[in-house]
Structures are given as C-alpha cells and as structure tokens.
Image (cartoon, rainbow, N blue to C red):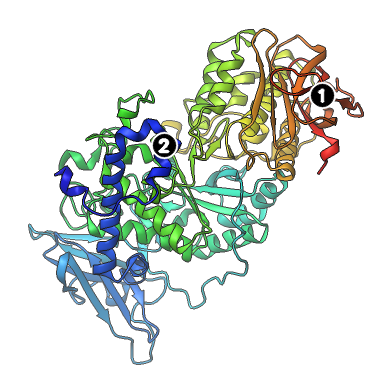
Amino acid sequence: MAAASTQGPRAPKLAQLLERDPYLAPFEQDFQRRYALFYNRLKSIEENEGGLDKFSKSYKTFGVNQFVDGGVYCKEWAPGAEAVFLTGDFNGWNPFSHPYKKMEYGKWELFIPPGQDGYSPVPHGSKLKVVIRAQNGELLYRISPWARYVVRDQDKVNYDWVHWNPPQSYIRKHRSPERLKSLRIYESHVGIASPEGKIASYKNFTYNVLPRIKDLGYNCVQLMAIMEHAYYASFGYQVTSFFAASSRYGTPDDLKEMIDVAHSMGITVLLDVVHSHASKNSEDGLNKFDGTDSCFFHSGPKGTHQLWDSRLFDYSNWEVLRFLLSNLRMWIEDYGFDGFRFDGVTSMLYHHHGIGTGFSGDYNEYFGLHVDEDALCYLMLANHMVNFLHPECITIAEDVSGMPALCRPVAEGGGGFDYRLAMAIPDKWIQIIKELKDEDWNMGNIVYTLTNRRYEEKCIAYAESHDQALVGDKTLAFRLMDAEMYTNMSVLSPLTPVIDRGIQLHKMIRLITHALGGDSYLNFMGNEFGHPEWLDFPRKGNNESYHYARRQFNLTDDHLLRYRFLNAFDRDMNKSEERFGWLASPPAFVSEKHESNKVIAFERAGLLFIFNFHPYQSYTDYRVGVEIPGKYKILLDSDASEYGGHQRLDHNTEYFSEEYPHNYRHNSLMVYIPSRVAIVLQNMDNAK
C-alpha cells in the first residue's frame, strides 16, 4: 500500500528542506509520499475537471445561480438521495413541482427558465429549501450547502435560506494592499466590537472600529465568526453555512463594503476559516444533508470529533475537495479577503486530532500512521491553489503540534503555509504570571520560549489572543490587576502597587513578544488597552446576557482612566515597528539574559532593546553590548509619562558606544535602566 502511494514525481525541492534540517532525513519517504499524494490529486483534477481554476470555481455552478438571461441553474451533490427537489416562495412551497435531474457521481441539476418578461423565476430575497427524498422515503427540507445568505427570524430556532441576488451588488472601489512583509494583526469579532450590549454590525465595524485599528498601527485585520454559525456562543467555530457571511451583523454587501474600506486604509483583511470540522446541525447545517451520516463527512465514529461534538470532513472525497477549495476561492473573489487563518489545523493533521496527546517535539510524532495524510494533502492543495491563483494572499496555520515544514513551500514537501501561530508564547506568559513571584521569573526560559521556532518557518507571535479572553480564563491585564481594575484605574485615585505593576508588565510583555517572538505579531481586539473582564457570549448559563460580549472602547477614550496609557504604548510600539521593520528583519541577537539582574538585551533591525524585569532594582551605568558603534538615543521608553510610567529616563540623553567588547558584541555602552522598564535605543548614526 505504502509503495503504491509513493508512485509519482519526487518533491522537486525536498533536498533543500533536508539540507536545512538534516534531522528530517530519516523521514524523506514520508515527505515524498505526501508530495506524491498531492501531485496525483492535482493531476487528477487537471485531467477530470479541466484544471484547478475551473474546479475551484464550482461555487458559480453549485447551489442556486442565476444566468445572464434570467434563468436559474441549480446543482447539488447528494449521493445518498433518492430524489431532489427545489421549493420555496417562488413555487408556493410545492415540494415536488421542481425536481432535479440525476447526474453521475451523486450530482443533481435543475434549470428553471426565465419568466416571459425575462425576470428571474426565483426573486431576490425569496426563501428556498432543497427537498431530499432519503433512501427510507423520508422527505428532508435542507439548506443548500452552497447557500450564500441565511437568516434567522427572532422567534425561530433554525435559519432560513434566503436567495441573495440583489439587482445591484456592492462594487469594490479599492484594490487590495500590496502583500505585506510583516503583519501586525488585529484579531477581531464584528459582533462584540461595540460597548453596547447587543450584536454589533458590519457598518459599526466599518465606521467606528477600522479607524481605531488604523490609528493603532495595525496593518491587518483577522476576522472571526464570519462564516455563518447558528450558535452565536460557539465564537464562529461551529459553522453551519460555509458560503454564507453571517447575517447577524448585516448583509453580504455590508461585509464587502467593510473589507473595501479596510483596503482603502491600506489594511489587509484575513478570514478565520474553519475547515477542520462542521456543526452537527442538520436542519440548517451540512450534517445528514442527503439523509445519510456520511456525504461530506466520514461515516461512523470517525466522522465525529469527541471533544467538539462536531462532524469531521472526509478529505479524501473528491466532492469535499471541490466544496472546500471553492469555499476559499469564493471568500477571496466575491468578498475581497486577502487570505486565511486556518483554524484547528492540529485536529486535521492527526487521526487522534491532538486529543490527549502532548507534543514533545520528537520527530516521530509527526510521521507515521497517526498522521491524516488526506487532510494534509487538502491543506497542501489549498495553499497551492491560493498561491497559484492569488499569490498576493496569505495563509496562517493554527497548529499546536509544531509539524515540521508546515510553513515551507509544497515543492519542498511542506504544507505551503506562510505563517504558523507561535502558540507556546501566550501559554508561557500565563504560566509565569500564575506560578512565579516576580523575582523568580527565569530570563533564559522567557528568551527560549520567544526564540524557539523552526528556522525559516515564519511565526506569528502574540502575548494573548481570543483564547485567553474567554470565560473561565483571564486576559493578561486581568491576571495582573484583577479586582483592582474596577476600583483603581482612574488617574484621580492613587496609583496602587498592583495597578502600577500590572501596567508596567503589560507593556513589557507586549514589547518583548512583539520584538523577539516572531516574524509577525497578533493582538485580540481590546487587549491592547487591557480590556477588563473575560469574554462570554449570551447563553442560558448567563441568562442570555450581552454584558461580557462587547468591547468597551469607551474606556480608552476616557482621559481620566489609565487604559489610555496602555493604548498609547501599543500604538507607538506598532508605529515603531512600521518605521524600522523588525518583524521582517532576521531574528534578534540576544546578548544578555541575566538571571539575578532580571535583564534581557537584544538587537534587531538596528535597534537595541533592553528589558529590566526586576521588581524593584534599578541599575545605573549598566553595560550593554552592541555590534554597531555610534551615538544611541531613546526611541521608545515604557516608563514615559504618556504610557503611565514614572518618567525616570531623560530622553535627551545620548549614549555613546565604546570599543569595549561585551557579551559577544564588539562594542558596548552604559545605560541607566530603572526597574520594570523596557527601553528601545536607536543608533542615530544610522537614523531612519
């Protein structure tokens, strides 16, 4: 079996991968087999479907699509169905008047000619259902898997499929920004992007949130919970309609306008895409679409995720590949998304889905029978397609396992992703804050976690994402300051030791993660200013309350509150990166990680970063090594008054290097480093 599956061409650039990491050499056959599987699937698509371009455009023929002459063409894949019909407002909900014709391979099609006046027989805004006669004779009323718009009336449990074909759709006015060298990502959820206790809209995000994001210096927005999901509290991770933009925030045109306005500001927009699993809903989801427990999914226990209680795709299935690849294509071409963050990649990569499995980094964990090579092949196809048809687009993998070569080109036998999330970093910060006294923080361990990444596989560093904000967990700000955030964040009240410590460490943790932790940076909306409390969506357990399902941007606009200090620091940190480009620079050279002094120093992008994590010890005339000689001045100082600091540093001071080797650097300089302060020094002889 293994021998047969390795037939096919060899990965053309695999030798480069093995040269870069010789420890992968024993797994050369695994890489060859993976590449052969990818190549043979791609070749089969070329031979049987007229090419990947045509295959991935299937969203224009499947579902319900209108011809130019006003006629309507309908197509579904329902291999388990005995018969298929279309019903809705257009035919008075007659379940049998519009039967589909059976085609090969479980497909069904229906053409409805235009009316005598040339108008569409299925008007825009009318409700529809696909009627499936199951093998047992039962009639099932289903939403098409390809439905582009589904809505739920307030008094209903399930969603309704609404035919979306407006006479004048939104026309894009702005081009996508140029592909970014480094991403400063603002992870966002449209529904909670307002201080009000309600579901916020695309329009609100367009006019109220995008200007904030631009002002903060982020160049990329990553949108969560856009693919339609019946259960709001699932955070968008239990998708019911893959081709529908969530109607709870507005119309598809509202989303298109939002993306277009972001592009006008030079902001790249990524979609959080969930292809790792699907909701178990059958009335308004994919589950049991044709009356069987398979169709898009594996049948039996293999088709259900034990922890998520959701359905698992059969990535070896031809029509599943068509569905998922077309889904990516639609979001790029119809809406203007600039790429994707693939959720749940670890679950996809392994038959065990990562359940009860700790990844130690032993390479044997990434190869063998426990790897789902069909799922990996799908990811390779997806990245190949995106890169081939839209090379300006970006893909990110959410993988906790650390699969080698996931972010290397497919031609090397890799997964083809551009970036992976550095998921160990937020876990490390939480562990340190929870378990250690400040004086016991281990500088070497912090540096190791921030720099421990695969060579030439790009990482996105973050101190915290939406995961840390969820109910039952705590944001970093809340862990650091807890109950005092409710009473002592006003500048009119004395600065308590708890609030002072929290504000100073919040800034330091963010800057060192930003500057040392990867090749791009991510922040979850609101966390830049230390948003208080966790995030919890309305559900039975909280009496359907929206109190925690909102972002209190008003807190940072209030000049009497200390949140504005954190907001200002976040903005200036991003603006400094924009100027000097440290994320796109080679990894930093760490010259110091001093355990007793609690000092970390490193150089990156021609800047010198110094962190003194000591809770009370300041240092005068502290020698720090630098490679490039010259006159240095302060570029960024977390102790500045505008950031809620104590103003212990004079920004007019000039620091001159001397030819005095120190910590493996040819030169060094003497600096004053107050306790709990981060300083960035710029070489003025090479000033930008």
Q: Nearer the viewer, residue 25 or 392?
A: 25
Taking the image as shown, residue 425 lies to the left or right of residue 315, namely right
Q: Quadrant of the C terminus?
A: top right
Residue indicated by mark 1? 492
- Label 2 amino acid? Asp
x, y percent for residue 124:
41, 74
Lower position in the chain sequence, tag 2 or tag 1: 2
Taking the image as shown, residue 369 lies to the left or right of residue 186, namely left
> 10 Å neighbourhood of mark 2: few (<14), some, or many (≥20)?
many
Report how far apart the C-alphas of labels 2 and 1 lie in the structure.
45 Å
Residue indicated by mark 2? 399
x, y percent for residue 673:
79, 17
When the figure is inspected, residue 281 is found, relative to residue 437, above or below; the finding is below
Whether residue 157 can be seen here: no
Residue 242 is drawn in which quadrant?
bottom left
Return the residue found at the far right.
Answer: 652
When the figure is inspected, residue 9 is found, relative to residue 676, above or below; the finding is below
Q: Nearer the viewer, residue 638 or 501?
A: 638
Q: Secondary structure at mark 1?
A: loop
Q: Residue at x 25, y 36 (%)?
A: 351
